[in-house]
C-alpha cells in the first residue's frame, strides 16, 4: 500500500514556545475522574489549573479530590483564563463543536472527545480556524496509540499478510441511558460506537475513498435518564462498506441493540473485534480496539495461530489528552491527529447519505498514512 502524502497541521507557532501545558477541563465527569485528569497532572510539565462542571457541588468535589485549586460552573472562565493554554472538552457530544470553536478563538489548543463536531463541514471549519491561529486541535478516539495497533500496522506494511483484501470491525451494546442525545438527530451508534472501528480500520488500511451503508432503527422507543420515554430518531444499527486503495474493502457494524455481557469492562474479553485478511495470512485483534488484549496472527497452513503483542505498554483508551499535552512540551508529533478524526467524521456523514439514497458516496478527506 502506498503512503498518502498529506500536509499535516504541524505549525505550532505559539505552541513551540511553551515549556508547560496548563489545562482547563470542561465537563469534569466520570471519564475525567478516573483516567483523563489524573494523566494530566501526573505528567511532567503539565498542570490542571481549573475544571468546569455545571453542578457547583460536583465541580467543587471533583477539584477537592484531585487537588485542583480552581473550579467553576462557567465555561467562559476557563476559555478566558490567560494562564490556560490547552483545553480538554468532555461534555455531551452536541456541544463539542461550539466549545472547541470558542476555545480556539480564545487562542487555546484543544483535545476534544468524539465526535469533534456534528458535521464534516463543522469539523473542517474547526481545523481551518486552528490553522489560522497557529494552534493544535485533536479529536478522540486514541485507538491508534495502542501497541496492538502499531503491531498490526507494521505487520501489514511488512507484507507478512500478502495482498490485503478485506477487513471487519464490530462494536455494540444495548445502548446508553444517561442522555437522550444518543437517540436524537445528530446522535446515533456511528458517532458513539462505530467511530472506534472506523478509526482503527482506516488507520490500518489507509483513507477510505468511498462509502456504502445501510442504517436502521431497530428499537423505536427508549427510556433515558434525562427525558424519560423518547422516540428514537438516529440510527441504532449501522453497517458500512469502506473502499480503500488497491481494491481493499472493509466492513464496520455497530449498534445499540447488540447484547454483550462484557459491556465496558473489556479487560477479560478473549474474543476478537477486528479482523484483517490477506492472501498470505490474517490477524484478529483480541478485545476491543479501545481495550486491546493481544493480536492473533495466522500465517501458516499447518501451525496454529500465534497470540502476539499482549503487552499493553501502559496504553489506556482515555490517554489522548495526556499524550497530546506531552507532545506540545516535547515538540513531538503524536500518532493521533485531527485530519484522521476529520476523515472519520466524513465517513459517518457519508454513510448516512448512502443509506438514505442507496448510492455509493465518494470521500474527499485524507490524513497522514501509514500511521505506524
Image (cartoon, rainbow, N blue to C red):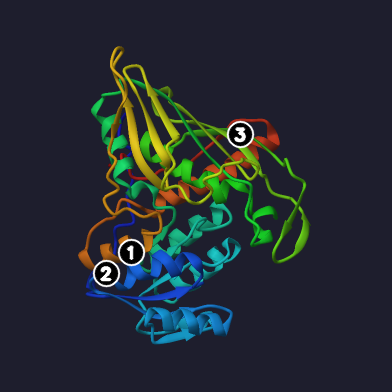
The residue most toward the top is 302
Residue 125 drawn at (x, y percent): 50, 59
What is the total number of numbered labels drawn onto the structure image?
Answer: 3
When asked about the image quadrant of residue 40, the answer is bottom left
Question: Does residue 366 show up?
Answer: yes
**Which residue carries the number 1 mark?**
322
**Which residue carries the number 2 mark?**
43
Residue in the picture at 27% in, 69% down: 43
Check disc 2 and report its element: helix, strand or loop.
Answer: loop
Give the mark toward the camera: 3 or 1.
Answer: 1
Neighbours of disc 2 within 10 Å: few (<14), some (14-19), many (20+): some
**Which residue carries the number 3 mark?**
213
Neighbours of disc 3 within 10 Å: few (<14), some (14-19), many (20+): many
Left-right relation of 88 to 6: right
Which numbered disc, 3 or 1, marks the residue that appears first in the sequence?
A: 3
The residue most toward the bottom is 69
**3D distance between C-alphas at marks 1 and 2:** 7 Å
Asked if 118 appears above or below 51 in the picture, the reply is above
Residue in the picture at 39% in, 48% down: 143
Check disc 3 and report its element: helix, strand or loop.
Answer: strand
When asked about the image quadrant of residue 162, the answer is top left
Residue 220 vs residue 118, the one in the foreground: 220
Which numbered disc, 1 or 2, marks the residue that appears first in the sequence?
A: 2
Whether the residues at callouts 3 and 1 have beta carbons within 8 Å, the answer is: no
| Quarter in which the C terminus is drawn | top left
Whether the residues at callouts 1 and 2 have beta carbons within 8 Å, the answer is: yes
Residue 233 drawn at (x, y percent): 73, 50
When asked about the image quadrant of residue 108, the answer is bottom left
Left-right relation of 154 to 99: left
Amino acid at each position: 500500500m502506498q503512503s498518502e502524502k498529506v500536509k499535516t497541521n504541524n505549525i505550532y507557532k505559539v505552541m513551540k514556545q511553551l515549556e508547560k501545558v496548563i489545562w482547563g477541563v470542561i465537563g469534569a465527569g466520570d471519564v475525567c475522574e478516573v483516567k483523563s485528569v489524573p494523566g494530566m497532572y501526573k505528567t511532567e510539565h503539565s498542570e490542571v489549573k481549573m475544571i468546569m462542571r455545571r453542578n457547583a457541588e460536583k465541580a467543587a468535589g471533583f477539584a477537592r479530590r484531585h487537588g485542583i485549586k480552581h473550579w467553576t460552573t462557567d465555561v467562559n472562565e476557563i476559555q478566558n483564563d490567560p494562564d490556560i493554554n490547552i483545553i480538554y472538552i468532555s461534555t455531551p457530544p452536541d456541544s463539542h463543536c461550539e466549545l472547541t470553536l470558542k476555545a480556539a478563538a480564545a487562542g487555546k489548543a484543544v483535545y476534544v472527545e468524539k465526535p469533534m463536531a456534528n458535521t464534516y463541514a463543522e469539523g473542517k471549519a474547526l481545523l481551518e480556524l486552528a490553522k489560522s491561529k497557529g494552534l493544535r486541535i485533536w479529536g478522540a478516539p486514541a485507538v491508534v496509540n495502542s501497541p496492538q495497533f502499531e503491531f498490526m500496522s507494521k505487520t501489514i506494511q511488512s507484507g507478512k499478510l500478502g495482498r490485503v483484501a478485506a477487513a471487519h470491525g464490530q462494536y455494540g451494546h444495548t445502548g446508553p441511558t444517561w442522555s437522550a442525545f444518543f437517540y436524537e438527530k445528530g446522535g446515533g451508534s456511528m458517532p458513539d460506537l462505530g467511530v472506534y472501528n472506523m478509526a482503527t480500520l482506516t488507520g490500518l488500511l489507509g483513507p477510505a475513498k468511498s462509502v456504502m451503508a445501510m442504517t436502521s432503527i431497530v428499537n423505536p422507543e427508549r427510556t433515558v435518564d434525562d427525558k424519560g420515554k423518547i422516540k428514537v430518531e438516529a440510527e441504532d444499527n449501522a453497517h458500512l462498506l469502506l473502499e480503500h486503495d488497491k481494491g481493499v474493502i472493509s466492513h464496520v457494524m455497530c449498534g445499540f441493540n447488540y447484547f454483550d455481557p462484557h459491556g465496558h469492562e473489556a479487560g477479560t474479553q478473549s474474543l476478537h473485534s477486528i479482523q484483517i485478511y490477506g492472501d498470505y495470512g490474517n490477524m484478529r485483534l483480541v478485545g476491543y480496539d479501545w481495550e486491546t488484549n493481544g493480536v492473533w496472527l495466522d500465517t501458516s497452513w499447518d501451525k496454529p495461530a500465534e497470540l502476539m503483542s499482549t503487552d499493553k505498554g501502559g496504553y489506556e483508551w482515555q490517554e489522548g489528552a495526556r499524550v497530546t499535552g506531552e507532545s506540545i512540551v516535547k515538540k513531538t508529533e503524536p500518532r493521533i491527529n485531527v485530519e484522521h478524526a476529520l476523515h472519520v467524521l466524513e465517513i459517518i456523514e457519508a454513510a448516512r447519505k448512502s443509506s438514505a439514497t442507496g448510492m455509493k458516496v465518494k470521500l474527499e478527506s485524507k490524513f497522514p498514512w501509514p500511521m505506524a
